[in-house]
Image (cartoon, rainbow, N blue to C red):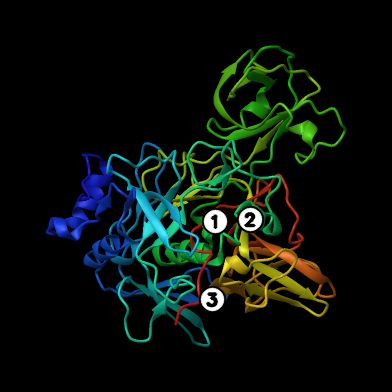
Amino acid sequence: MDFTFPRNETLERIAVALEGMGASAVPKFSEETGRYDNASIAAWLARMRDGKNYGVSIPKGSSTACTKTGANAGIANPKPGVIGRAAIDPYVNQGAFFFVEVNGGVDADGMPYVTAIDGDGRFSRLDDTWVLTPVLYTLETETDDAVNLTVSDTRQPGMKRQPAALLPNGAQRPYMLYAKYALSVDSDGKPRSVSGAAVKTRSVSHDGGISLMKTSSTGDSLKVAADDWYVKTMFMLKYATKNSQSIFSGCTGYDITATPTLAESNTTRVVIAKDKADQILIGSAMMFGTHTGTNTDRGYDYNCDIFDGARVTKKFAIDSSNVAVYFDVAKPFSTATTYQLATAPWNTGSCDMVEGDGSPTSCTDGKQPFVVQGIELGLGMLEVLGNVLIQYTGTGAVVYVNPDTKNEKAGSSPDSALSAGAFPGQAAEGWNYALYCKTVNGLMIQQGTGASTSVGICDGNYKVDDTTVGWREWLSLGNLWDWGNAGLWFVGGRNGSGDPGWFIGSRRSANGRSRGEAA
């Protein structure tokens, strides 16, 4: 069966890329397997290559501005969009930047598969949803002054395959898949990447992800370094800045708690003071608890025992001082003036109505998630990497990347893990701000010290004292109150490898099983 699209926006976008191609050039779907043929997808992507080298020069100094090079020079930075105003993005359908949303997954040997493509009549964001891209080829060189990164959809002399492009058996993936959405679970506890779900937190950690994703027997894993690399690389190439929060702040300044001002029963709303309600965004998510204890921390069950991650549907003024906040919940509840309402990480799919890169209503207000290259990020929680750990040796800290998550183990990195070098920072515990970044064994990692939230990389990485001994997980992006410390290069490096939290989540990865950084 040939691949055909009904008439919709995806058709309009992909039709441009397919212009002039015959029916033999498009993916083939098998009714027998329920999957598209991987070889036909790879051939389809190959016919859309432009062969251009898109580059960016990343200065090693304090300047945040990068320089576009090669075929990237002269391409204007995109203008991110919001709901109702589409992004203006000159990179759409450009060679290395091509992507399309699909349903699918990954087999136990690490081979990705596709069951539906956006626009084919089978696709649904309520099924496991991924962003499909071509395998990219990269060249990264260093001078005294800069790291120069070049990416292409066609292998050029000196280039190597992108991180995780090779399967454990040495074969190249036919394409790359990246989870569109943060991790949630279904009623049976099965991990998924779907729209419209409360994110999975509270029990997610590096160690917990091994059993949750069944890494020893499946191709699934938590988010890995290769997933992180793709977003960072695309961002750098498109926006040419080391300061990711200058474009997308993410939900990093949305730490609001309130107590009801009115007790009600059999309701789906919570009435709170107007000054608190004015800070709450429709579409965001909150938690509500009986607050029978004295601690206000969201990690306590009594602060989320009524609902956890319910979406705000509307607000209604009761009077000049009080506002009712309504929630999308399965059943009504009661409220009391001693209960606690608090912001929570956004639900998945909150950016579904954004056309292109952007956020629901503001990209920089510090309250909202964002989407880059079709991937929704910055929901107000930290995303743990399932194949990266930091080892504190007693005299410093070293970062390790494990190429094949089938070997991942709790409490430390396996012997197969590769060193990505030192975790930057001063000897004493605290925040460090790196000057630049580079890719080491598949992980795009910060380098240097002495910057701040406004110069250099601009994102903080938290490091414990050099005299510490033990393993810590790699927590990315930032949570509800990390403010200027947060961003694409943020790392929390103090939590133990098995430490979960209400503010810690992740996402599925189809790229956990690989041979290592490709040669």
User: Picture quarter containing residue 385?
Assistant: bottom right
Mark 2 element type? helix
The local crowd at label 3, few if under 14, some if 14 to 19, many if 20 or more residues have their Cα within 10 Å, is: some
- Could you give the CA–CA distance between mark 1 and mark 2, rounded to whole angstroms? 8 Å
Badge nearest the viewer, 3 or 2: 3
User: Picture quarter containing residue 492?
Assistant: bottom right
Residue 258 position, x and y percent, is: 73, 29
The residue that label 2 is drawn on is 484
Which mark, residue 438? Answer: 3
- Does residue 304 sit above or below 67 in this rendering? above
State left or right for residue 358 relative to residue 191.
left
The residue that label 1 is drawn on is 245
- Could you give the CA–CA distance between mark 3 and mark 2, rounded to whole angstroms? 21 Å
Query: Does residue 453 appear in the picture of this structure?
Result: no
User: Picture quarter containing residue 317?
Assistant: top right
Three-letter amino acid code at the position of disc 3 = Lys
Three-letter amino acid code at the position of disc 2 = Gly
State left or right for residue 47 relative to residue 226.
left
The local crowd at label 1, few if under 14, some if 14 to 19, many if 20 or more residues have their Cα within 10 Å, is: many
- Does residue 488 sit above or below 88 in this rendering? below
| Picture residue at 44% right of the left edge, 82% below the top | 519
| Picture residue at 40% right of the left edge, 42% below the top | 354
For the residues bearing labels 1 and 2, Cβ distance under 8 angstroms: yes
Q: Earlier in the sequence, mark 1 or mark 3?
A: 1
